[in-house]
Image (cartoon, rainbow, N blue to C red):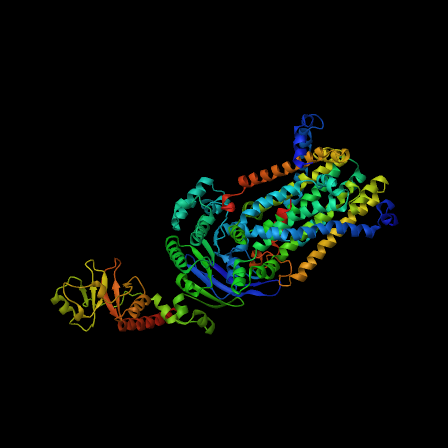
Amino acid sequence: MNVLHFVNAFFSDGAHWHGYDGIPTRLAEHIRYCLIALAVAAAIGLPVGLVTGHYGRGGNALAFLATAARALPSFGLLVLMTIMVGFGLLPVMVPLVVLAVPPILVTTYESMRSVDPSPVDAARGMGMQESRILLQVELPVALPLILSGLRSGAIQIVSTATIAAYVGIGGLGRYIIDGLYQRDYEKVVGGASLVAALALATLVLFWAAGRFTVSRGVRRGA
Amino acid sequence: MIRIDSVTKRYPDGTVAVDRLSLDIPDRSITVLVGPSGCGKTTTLRMINRMVEPSEGAILLDGADIRKQPVNTLRRSMGYVIQNAGLFQHRTIIDNIATVPRLLGWSKQKSRARAAELMERVGLDTALAKRYPYQLSGGQQQRVGVARALAADPPVLLMDEPFSAVDPVVRKGLQDELLRIQAELGKTIVFVTHDIDEAVKLGTMVAVLRTGGRLAQYAPPAELLSEPADAFVEDFLGTDRGIRRLSFFGSGALELRTEPIVAVDSTAEQIAARAAGDVPYLLVTGLDGRPLGWSAPEDLTAGAVDPGRLLSCGRPFAHGEESLRAALDCAVLSPTGWAVAVDGTGRAVGVVSQQTIGEAIRGAHAEGRAEAKAAR
Amino acid sequence: MNRFFDLPSDLQHDWLGLIGLHLREALLPVLAGLVLSLPIAQLCVRFRWLYAPVLGVTTILYAIPSLAVFVVLIDYTGQTELTVMIPLAVYSLVVLVPAIVDGVRSVPQETLAAATAMGLGPLRRYFQVQLPIALPAIIAGLRVAAVSSISLVSVGMLIGNQGALGNLLNDANIYHRPELAWNSVLTTAGLAILVDAALVLLRLVLTPWMPRGTGRRGSRAAAEVRPEPAASAAEEAAR
């Protein structure tokens, strides 16, 4: 009854490695849903956070929006969406995006607010346009925090995208749901460890992205 | 010339930062805005590059209203230096300095060449070019700030308390450097500070502002020290303005005495001859002519002078180069009451008594008053 | 509107009863998480090297889907509330530990030095200086933990109707009554917002010394002392 025993049994079973229900297929599905959801959430959260943070306005409205979005239960939203629009990709994407927007939005806003005001003042005094100040002066300094917000959103999506299986479109959640109904712990633990591994890979990916995109002058010794 | 023409800045909450201020800022000189906090000096500076827009009045640059040209064109034609330098921490030193040339569309290569040239001009080792701001000391960062402001060779330089965040020793170095650069480049500099000593040291003209943004006095520093317009200015200048004013009088006119100087290898006859005058002490100089110290004539034994037993002559003043203030300081600190004058190479060229310096000060003050009267 | 609150009898609770159940299932784990995370955080503050591995392990734990944990736990704790609450407690640890660590670390060194100089022992210093100053950060962490916990309880529906308000979702499917799903989602969201507001209120009451208002960059000093440093820290650490 050891968890590691289940993990070992799951991954050494050759049947889990190919075909329609194989690990590569499920993993690819899962990653695809995660990337779409993260892209949509970033497309909403980043620009709004950057602009409001730059002008320092709307922080309260933003905090309220973020709280409201966080308050919406992902699973409830999924069930509600399937009742409203039926099965498919959309009912999965809505809760995932709602889940990931608050951390991205709030962290981006906070990161822009925490940028030292004096270089911004200097840049303005030198005659830099506002858009350039945002992109070339504030963004590079805010980047580490922004990446951490994206990372939080990404990890939450990776974990929660398992709900896709509930509406029949696969992903790693398939193993967990099937395992639940078939009382097959091997599948449940195997699926869960795949999700955890994907989360770990996401962490590593963001760490690498930080190394490549954050200037040495901002990173300092850290 | 920058003309500030009865400018008022009133904020929506009713506070008045600048109140009907008029000021003519002459070209190719340093004009200092000085005053206590809340006197509107920074607001005034920031109105010149339109970081703040005046509520009333106008600012003219060479006769044209600054609102006539696009705001970013105006700002790119004025260097801007702020308190903590405001460097871009994600860019290397050389790229920080190249910011405005790049904004103006210069090529990367040309911008960097220009930036390297400026690093040398402000006294920065070009080996620092690839470093990031956090790797530099506060003083070095401020030099980068000045270089960045000068990069596109703007005719005007706006400096907002640029040196107030560094320690006094570094600050003095930066001030001297600014004066040297200004002597080479001849920019129109508007300089904001709360430090009256800095204002007096750097300013060709000094505008003293009082709380509420009103002009208290606008004058050259020497005049400010000799004739403060009112009690506020007098109070702001502090207690020893008489002494400080001596900085503006040269020491070249001081009559030096040369007979009390003896070389360390003098013979007994030479010492006796030198001691015959009315000066109670003799200044002993080394073989290279530099002053070693004072001694009473009877304590000097020819051929056996022990430099360790001489009275210290302190820090001598450079005759003709340094001011009467330096000469007086030297005399006051001297155990004999006599100041030692040296030439540019450090060789003793004479000694002068407190009394002689006092006479020179009285003469200089009389002359200053006459000049001020003639100017009016 | 009547049908909205007319709940099927298989739920064994009326609407208010479900709310009570939901709050208990969501908030007890957060409380347990808080009690556990205080000593863990203190250890991380004391031994700096511990913080990175603790953060890594908790982040991975957070990434494991709640449903998977439920299923594995059923063998030990059965289809009960406890099965739902255990993973929720673990998740709140992940939010709370970094929030508390950052909060306690944000106490200025000179403040601590002053406390020591006045003769406060380590225990008094912790309870009378460090903890109160870290309080805004801790409450910011509690807000994120409580809201996410309230949201996650619903998943308990999948393991034999242990999801309180989430159980309405199941009935909405079984009885084809979409209004029950609306009821579930809206009530859960409403609860989360109310609990969040209550925690904000608690902070205002407990920290009268904090600057009020929202003018964050009103003065330059305000920009340096960010009112809620942990908001983003908690956000950052959350999963």
Which one is in front, B99 or A127? B99
Residue pictured at 80% horizontal, 44% vertical: C167
Quarter residue C174 falls in: top right
Where is residue A205? Give x, y as percent.
59, 38
Which one is in front, B125 or B223? B125
Where is residue C46? Give x, y as percent.
55, 52
Where is residue A130? Give x, y as percent.
57, 48
Give the number of marks.
0
Residue pictured at 38% horizontal, 50% vertical: B123
What is the quadrant of the C terminus of chain B in the image?
bottom left
- The answer, for residue C221, to whether it is visible in the render is yes
Where is residue B295? Give x, y as percent.
21, 68
What is the quadrant of the N terminus of chain B in the image?
bottom left
Q: Is residue B141 above or below residue B320?
A: above
Q: Is residue B188 above or below residue C79?
A: below
Residue C43 is left or right of residue B23, and the answer is right
Residue A31 is left or right of residue B65, and the answer is right
Quarter residue C127 falls in: bottom right
Residue B105 is left or right of residue B171, and the answer is right
Q: Is residue A174 above or below residue A80?
A: above
Which one is in front, A212 or B151? A212
- The answer, for residue C232, to whether it is visible in the render is no
Residue B180 is left or right of residue C237, and the answer is left
Which residue, as the protein is rendered here, is positioned at the far front?
A1
Which one is in front, A183 or B228? A183
